[in-house]
Image (cartoon, rainbow, N blue to C red):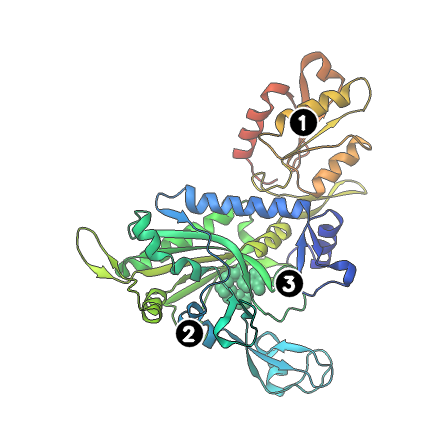
Amino acid sequence: MSEVTMDTLVSLCKRRGFVFQSSEIYGGLSSAWDYGPLGIALKKNIQEFWWKEMTRLHDNIVGIDAAIMMHPRVWEASGHVENFTDPLVDCKKCKMRFREDKIPEENAKNKICPECGGELTATRRFNLMFKTHIGPVEDDNNNIVYLRPETAQGIYVNFKNVVQNCRMKVPFGIAQVGKAFRNEIVTKNFIFRTCEFEQMEMQYFVQPEDDMKWFEYWRGERWNYYKKMGIRENKLRWHQHGPDELAHYAKCAYDIEYEFPMGFQELEGVHNRTDYDLTRHTQYSGKDQSYLEEGTNRKFIPYIIETSAGLTRNVLMVLSDAYEEQQVAEGDTRVVLHFHPNIAPIKLAVFPLVKKDGLAELASDIEHNLRDEFATYYDQSGAIGRRYRRQDEVGTPYCITVDYQTKEDNTVTLRFRDSMEQVRVKIDEIPAFIRKADKEYKRV
Ligand code: ATP
């Protein structure tokens, strides 16, 4: 099991401004969470890291940003209207509602409430899509729209646009990051499962005969991505979908799971979706979604290899993975978040050793000069040791202290978060020093 409990993470996140409960002053809304100043910085950095990895570092992957509300026929074609349901049961006594597949098997079989022992109702299928109406007339069945339950369909319906207008040739990929909504039964586990969340998806369009080659390629890429982000490899594992888990359209599906505080759970899916999606959109829209291959003149419906990760779930994973309570000396412990420097919300903090004798002004100048390139933070209050600990607790990889020697030789003390080692660095060499340290980072 993980070294950190969910309660510890929730409390750290609140105390340091990563994640707050939504509308807390009204008692909160279950399963909704707000990202505070450090949380949004962390989320954006993870998103940026993914975006760079999945688009810029590849020759043939482009991004899009599709609308959340789409034509309702999209969700008929995708199968969501018919199949995107959870089996739900209610307790007749305490009125709690459960997902039948998420309660212990014994309870499900004997229809006994896992909370109070009361009797459970028969199972009902419940569609997870949020439905609303567009326009002023609410009861008109013709103006239903859904809040998208996944970002993938926005990519599929733009396949032809990208082929025709962006000069992309199969194999190629389209990446997208955005909100998705599912009317889930959520009881606990913080931001792991929420009704409103964000996904980072990349759909890779391939020749049908090459599907398994690309499937294996993307499995490798996605595993390496987490390693590159500094995630401990022994906390990750593959889970292959067995025949009864496999979606009707999927040929082969693996999930990357991470060992969260509550145990191993899905982080991302890598799925071979075959030609299902584009075939269905051809049928439902009446617009041919096949691809004409240059050179061979062959016409085919591409297969799709999907990589689908939760961004908000990545935030929870990164926090769980980074957290450590460390004994630094007899009777002295510190909380440290070992974020990879590329995703840390604050890259470097600058402190004057004391406020007087011009040190505060000097430190503040240094901090201002570094702002353009790095996410910086200035702190002049409290003992220096306390300031270091405050930064350790939010995962700031480097702290710079300006002292009396700085006035003499233009050097500062640079302290590393993980090792707590300190070195002297010339002021004008700080940016190059940090760039190099980022590249060479290894968690201690
Ligand atoms: P689960 O079995 O946990 O409900 P899923 O298999 O339905 O998830 P996918 O549809 O494959 O999930 O979605 C891809 C990714 O989106 C998941 O791996 C997860 O990281 C993220 N995700 C899905 N549902 C949620 C949610 N309700 N809250 C947060 N993230 C989610």
The residue that label 1 is drawn on is 367
Looking at mark 2, is its residue's CB closer than 8 Å to ligand 1? Answer: no
Residue 301 tag number: none
Name which residue lies at 72% across and 24% down: 363
The residue that label 2 is drawn on is 243
Toward which corner of the image does residue 362 lie, by quadrant?
Answer: top right
Q: What kind of element bears circle 2?
A: loop
Check disc 1 and give the amino acid type. Glu
| Mark 3 burial class by Cα count in 10 Å: few <14, some 14-19, many 20+ | few
Name which residue lies at 77% across and 43% down: 333
Pointers 1 and 3 in contact (CB under 8 A)? no
Q: Disc 1 vs disc 2: which is toward the camera? A: 1
- Distance from disc 1 to disc 2, alpha carbons, whole Å, reads 57 Å
Q: What kind of element bears circle 3?
A: loop
Name which residue lies at 38% across and 65% down: 273
Is any part of residue 440 visible from this angle? no
